[in-house]
Image (tube, coloured by chain):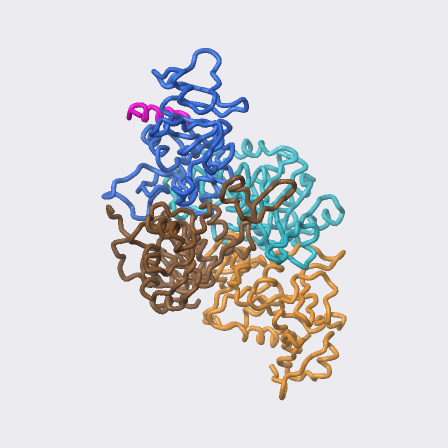
Chain colours: A blue, B orange, C cyan, D brown
Amino acid sequence: MSSGAKERMLARAARDIRPGMTVNLGIGLPTGVLGHLDAGLPICLHSENGIAGVGRQLPYAEADRNLIDAGGAYVSPVAGTSYFDSAVSFSIVRRGRLDLTLLGAFEVAMNGDLANWMIPGRFSPGPGGAIELAQKARRVGVITMHTDKSGRPKIVERCTLPLTAAGCVNRIYTDMAVCDITPEGLRLAEIAEGVDPDRLQSATGAPLLMPEGPIPTF
Amino acid sequence: MSSGAKERMLARAARDIRPGMTVNLGIGLPTGVLGHLDAGLPICLHSENGIAGVGRQLPYAEADRNLIDAGGAYVSPVAGTSYFDSAVSFSIVRRGRLDLTLLGAFEVAMNGDLANWMIPGRFSPGPGGAIELAQKARRVGVITMHTDKSGRPKIVERCTLPLTAAGCVNRIYTDMAVCDITPEGLRLAEIAEGVDPDRLQSATGAPLLMPEGPIPTF
Amino acid sequence: MRSKTTPMAEAVAAIGDGASVMIGGFGVPGTPFCLIEELARQGAKELTIIKNDANEAGMGVDLLLQNRQVARLITSHIGLNANAIRLMNAGEIEVELVSQGILAERIRAGGAGLVGIVTDIGLGTPLAKGKTMLSLAGREAIFEPALTADFALLHAERADDFGNLSYAATARNFNPLMAMAASCSLAETETLVGQGQMIPEAVHTPGVFVDHVMELAELPEVYHVVRR
Amino acid sequence: MRSKTTPMAEAVAAIGDGASVMIGGFGVPGTPFCLIEELARQGAKELTIIKNDANEAGMGVDLLLQNRQVARLITSHIGLNANAIRLMNAGEIEVELVSQGILAERIRAGGAGLVGIVTDIGLGTPLAKGKTMLSLAGREAIFEPALTADFALLHAERADDFGNLSYAATARNFNPLMAMAASCSLAETETLVGQGQMIPEAVHTPGVFVDHVMELAELPEVYHVVRR
C-alpha cells in the first residue's frame, strides 16, 4: 500500500467525524486519523485510560509523565479536558456515550463481525478495551488495508478468528474503498480514485453490492 | 426513662468507640453519643450521604447549606474530611470499612436479629441505609430504651416485625443494661447502677445469661 | 469541544408524558429545585421519578407529587414528606422502596452500561420479596437490575459549557451517578465557566455524560439555609 | 483522625506467600514502582497479581515475574511485556485475561461489597467461555464475580496522613478502584501533607479505604518521561 493510499484512507475516515461527536480512536492505524482532523473541530476525543478531551501527541521533551493515551503516547490536554478512573472511562463506552469508534481489524465479515484481538496459538496479549469499544460504541468504523501482506482479503464472508464482537461494524475504510454493512449485505459506498470495481471485488472476500448510479470516489 | 439514665446509656456506648475507628451513628438516639465523645478522640465519623470526617453540628446561623449529615442536621468538616458520591459512601459500608455502627431499634432479638425500619400498615417510609449498615458494619451496636412506652420489652426472643437484618447485632446498650449477643445466647455484660437483676430480667423478653462473678455496673 | 448551554425551558420541554426522570439530591443539597419547578410548570404527566428521597412537603419533588405528575416513584426513604406517604398509602402513586446504597448501585450500573448487579443486601428481609434470586457457588444472592432513565435533572456548583460538573460538599450524592445513567442529562449550575476554567482532575462528572447545561441567574431561597 | 504513615518495608512485610495483590497503574502513570520493588526485595512467593497490564519488560510488575514470585495474573493486556507472554505460553504463570472495563468493574464491585455484576460484554466471544450464564427476562447475560484482594499497592500524587489520596491526570486509572477492593491498602505518595491540607471535594480516594501511607523521598527515573 502506498503512503498516499493510506493517507487518503485516513483522511476519508476523518471526514466522517462531525462536530459535537465523542470519539475513540483505537491503537494503530485509527490513531493516524488525528493528523487529518481540523484542530478547531469541536469534538471530544476519549481515551480509555481515563481522558475525555485528548489533545495532540507530545514529544518526550515536552511530555507530562502522568498524561498518556491508551496506546502509551504522551498527549496534551485541551480546554475542557477531564480525567477519571477506569470504571468511569468504560462507563462512557458501555453506556453508549461514544458516538463513534474507529478500530483496526484482522478480519471483518460482511455481517459486521469483527476479529481484531486474538490469533489462537500466535497472538493473545489480552483484549484490552477492544471488545467493549466494538460492542458498545453507537457507531463502529474499521480502518484496515483492503488485503493483508500476502494479498488475502481482510473483508470476508465469515470470520475465522475468535470474534471481538458480533455484528458490530457499521462501516469499513480501506485503501481501496469505503463499504457499509447493511441488512442486505456489504454495500460499496465509495471507491478510491483509480481503483477498478472488478479488481476491488476480487480483492474482497465477500460479494459487494453496488451503489445505485455512478460509484462515488474518494 | 429519666434523662440521667439516657445520658448514662449514651455515655456507656461512647466508651466503646476507640481511637482509630471508623463509625456511623444512626439517626435518632445514636446521634446523641456524639455529645459524649472527647473532641480529640482520633476517630472518623461516616455519614451515608457522602462524608468521612463529620464534625460537630452547627446552628442554622453558622451552617453551610451544602453540608448536612444523613439525618439532615447541618454539620461541620474536620481536618481530613472527604466528600464522595452515594455509591462510594455505601461501598465504605458494604466493603466492611465501618468498624462500628450504632443503630436504633423497634425490636432486637436474642439471636441478634434487628427490626428498626418498618411497622407493617403503620410505618414504612423506606429503609434508607439501615439495612446495609446493619448487615455490613463489622460491629453493630443497638441503642434503645430497655422497654417501650407501654413497658413492653424491646429485647425479645424473636422479632415479630420485618427484619432489617438477621443476626447482625453484637451488643445492646439500654438505660438498664449492656447485653452481648453470644453463641450461647443473650449475655448480660453490665447493669446500670441501681437496677436489680431480677427487675432487669422481668423487663427483658428473652432469658439473660449472667456473667461470671459480680455484675459490673455502669 | 461543543458548547451545551441551553435555555432551561427549552431543555425541559423535551420531557414528555410517561418519561422516566432521575433527580439528584439528598435532602436539600444537590437537589435541582429550579429544574423541578420548570418541570412542574410545563406539566408532563405519568412520570416515573427516581430520587433518593421525596424532599419535604412543599418543596422539590413534592411539587410534582402535588401536581399529580408522578405515576411511580423509585426511592429509598420518603419519611420526611407526609404528602408522599399519603399518596403511597392511598395507592395514587406506585412506590418502589430500595435500600439506599443499592439504589445508588442500580443507578450506577445503569450508567455503567451493565445489566445489573448481584448482592446479598436484603436477604431475609421484605425487600428481597419478588426479586430474582441466584444461587452462585452454593450461596444465595439477589439480582438487582440496572436502572436507567430518559432524563436526569442535576444540580452542580460549577460547570463549564461542555458540561463538566463539580459539586459542593454533600450536594454530590446521587448527581454523578444519575448523570451517567440517563439518556439525556440536564444540569443547572450555580456558576458557569468557559472550557479550560475547571481543573481536569477536579471534575466530578465528565461533560461526556451531560447534554444540557444552564446557569442559574440567582438561587431561590429554597436552596439556602433556612429554619423550616 | 488517625495517622496512617508507615515505613514502606514494614507495611510490605505483611504481604505473605500466597497473598493476592492488586497493583494500580495503566502503563507508567499510577504504577507504584517503589512498592513493587520493595515487594520484589522482600520476596513473597505464589502471589496472585491483579493489574491492568504487565508493564514493560524490566520494570514494575515484570520484576515480580522475573523473580518467579507470581503464580497467577489477572489482567487485561500484557502485549507490551514479552517476558509475561513467554511465561504465560510456557505455563509458568496462570493468566486470566479480562476485558479492560469489566476488569475495572469486577474490582469496583469487590470494593463496593457486591457479589458481582451482570453484563452482556463478551457474549459470543472466547471470553464468555466457562463463565456463569444467566437468562434474565429472556435475555442471555454473563455473571462476572467481584474481585477483592488481600492487599492493594497504590501510587498517589498527594496524600494526607489519614490516607486521603489524589492522583494526577491519567495516573488515576485503577488506583481508586483497587483502594476500595483490598482488605489492606498501601499507598505511596509523591507528596504527603497534614490533615486539613487537601480540599475535601478534590479527594479521589477517601482515607477510610487506605491503611498505610508513605511518602517517597525521591522519584526514581522509572517514573519519569524517558525515551526507552
Q: Residue furthest top?
A: A213
Task: Specify the segment rendered in magenta.
Answer: A1-16
- Left or right placement of residue B80 versus residue B179 in this view: left
- The image quarter containing residue B142 is bottom right
Q: List x then y, in percent, for residue B72.
A: 58, 57
Q: Does residue C23 show up?
A: no
Task: Pick whichever, A70 or B189, lies toward us.
Answer: A70
Quarter assignment of residue D189: bottom left
Q: Position of residue D220 (x, y in %)?
A: 26, 57
Q: Is residue A117 above or below residue D111?
A: above
Location of residue D24 in the rendering, given as x and y in whole percent from the top left corner: 39, 54
A4 in the magenta segment: yes
Picture layout, residue D227 above or below residue B191: above
Q: Nearer the viewer, residue D194 or D191?
A: D191
Front residue (pair B140, A194): A194
Which residue does the image show at 63% across and 49% down from the upper left? C75
Q: Is residue C171 left or right of residue B205?
A: left
Give the residue at x 68% y 69%: B108
Q: Residue at x 64, y 81 (%)?
A: B191
User: Residue B158 at what x, y percent from top left?
Assistant: 73, 68
| Position of residue C122 in the picture relative to residue C190 (left or right) | right
